[in-house]
Amino acid sequence: MKHQEPTLRFLGATDTVTGSRYLLEAGGKRVLVDCGLFQGYKRSRERNRAPFPVPPHSIDAVVLTHAHLDHTGYVPALVRDGFTGPVIATDGTTDLCKLLLPDSGYLQEEEARYATHRGSSRHSPALPLYTAADAVKSLNSFKIHDFDDPLDLGGGMDMTFLPAGHILGAAQVRVRIGSHAVHFTGDLGRTDDPLMNPPRPLGEADVLVTESTYGNRKHDTTDPEHQLGDIINRVAKRGGVVLFAAFAVGRAETLMLHLSRLRGKHLIPDIPVYLNSPMAIDASGMYQRHPEEHRLKEQEYLNMYKVAQLTRSVDESKLLNLRGGPMIIISASGMLTGGRILHHLAAYGPDPKNAVILSGYQAGGTRGAALAAGGRELRIYGEDITIRAEVIQMESLSAHADADGIIAWMKTAAREPRMTYITHGEPDASDALRLRIKRELGWRARVPEHLEKISLEDPR
């Protein structure tokens, strides 16, 4: 029987910070590591509509690093289009995907309805990428697997989940194929994250595939609690509203943790705080179910959720737009791509006494990136909205390791990988990290091309 050379193919995240998809082939088997949505610029988003690079039915298993949609959001389409294998994920990732994927399907349907109404689609009616029903159906394919427990994938491949920090359930993925060890970082967390535990050290890897979200940046060393306190006191004094654009999973909890600590020290005024994200509310119990993954003591957890009034219904959300300040609203999405935050932004963004806080990385092509870059005209639900509110980007709240953090984590390697591939970053960030890896570690490193296939026996 002819020997099949094991290969790795980069199906996404090679010239963008979204769309993570990596295809491993060995022993007649195909395993897809991550199955993410492309987000941001239209050129990237259009890849979601293209036929998948290999027939979905030919893939034997999908392995997910964590629940964020740029790593999981294409799973419903893959299952709908013929994938019948298992979607292997940690318990925490599976729990979060039960929230994120149906919500993503609902938003896809909402966008399609809006495009039909506006007449901006090539199809009439406009077609969603997938539906909420597709997403719910895809959840039947999920198979929970524990950290540190090797799993035979067939074709001579076995994989192990290792803690990555970042968010609940987030994992690094190590795949052994014969004598080759391929290590995927997923999204690496921070060693100083106030909420999540730090990522596991690297250990041994022949081929390393690393994210580079912050590959050209260092996080602000300003104490985020001190910065938040200053902003809230400043805006409250002028009777304004503080809008936190928060990622519903992870960032909302970090914000509430900081707010509860500030409130406990009487460092911010006793103004109303609203958590207006049903998804973040539904995710709250997961931190209790997975205490081994985070730093929170039980009382801290209870205080964190006492600080905010939980807003579930659409009517309650609408009433917040009539209430006025001073108050604090935490709402999704974190990059202003959709969700309830857009209604609040349209209501409160034009008033200079208010403030908008961007609580993490803003992918190119999103409204959040436009605001962070100084843009003040945003298109929201078909209207041009002028943003006169104060805009603050707090990258100190990011749940990603920065460039220094990634390099420090790489130094924990038991030996130098034969090759390091830099992915999941904008082109300037990926190339900056490549240079640092070569200059500071002396490792071979490069940024792969979209759809490039490499041999794991000779990874160049």
Image: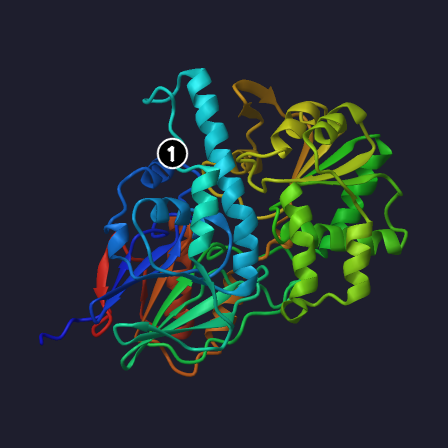
Q: Point out residue 273 in the picture as x, y percentages from the top left corner.
A: 79, 41
Would residue 194 be seen by someone viewing this image from the given angle? no
Q: Residue at x 50, y 29 (%)?
A: 110
Query: In what quadrant of the picture does the N terminus appear?
Result: bottom left
Q: Nearer the viewer, residue 88 or 300?
A: 88
Q: Is residue 139 left or right of residue 269?
A: left
Residue 357 vertical position relative to residue 96 in the rendered view, above or below: above
Query: In what quadrant of the picture does the C terminus appear?
Result: bottom left
Q: Nearer the viewer, residue 207 or 116?
A: 116
Q: Residue at x 61, y 68 (%)?
A: 191
Q: Nearer the viewer, residue 88 or 174?
A: 88
**Residue count near mark 1 (Cα–Cα under 10 Å), binned few <14, some 14–19, many ≥20:** few
Q: Point out residue 6 in the picture as x, y percentages from the top left corner.
A: 22, 70
Mark 1 lies on residue? 42
Q: Is residue 42 left or right of residue 396?
A: left
Q: Point out residue 442 in the picture as x, y percentages from the top left corner.
A: 36, 74
**Residue flagged by tag 1: what amino acid is it?**
Lys
Residue 19 vertical position relative to residue 245 in the rendered view, above or below: below
Residue 135 vertical position relative to residue 179 in the rendered view, above or below: above
Residue 351 vertical position relative to residue 133 in the rendered view, above or below: above
**Residue sitting at the far left:** 1
User: Which colour scheme appears in the figure?
Assistant: rainbow
Would residue 136 be seen by someone viewing this image from the given angle? yes
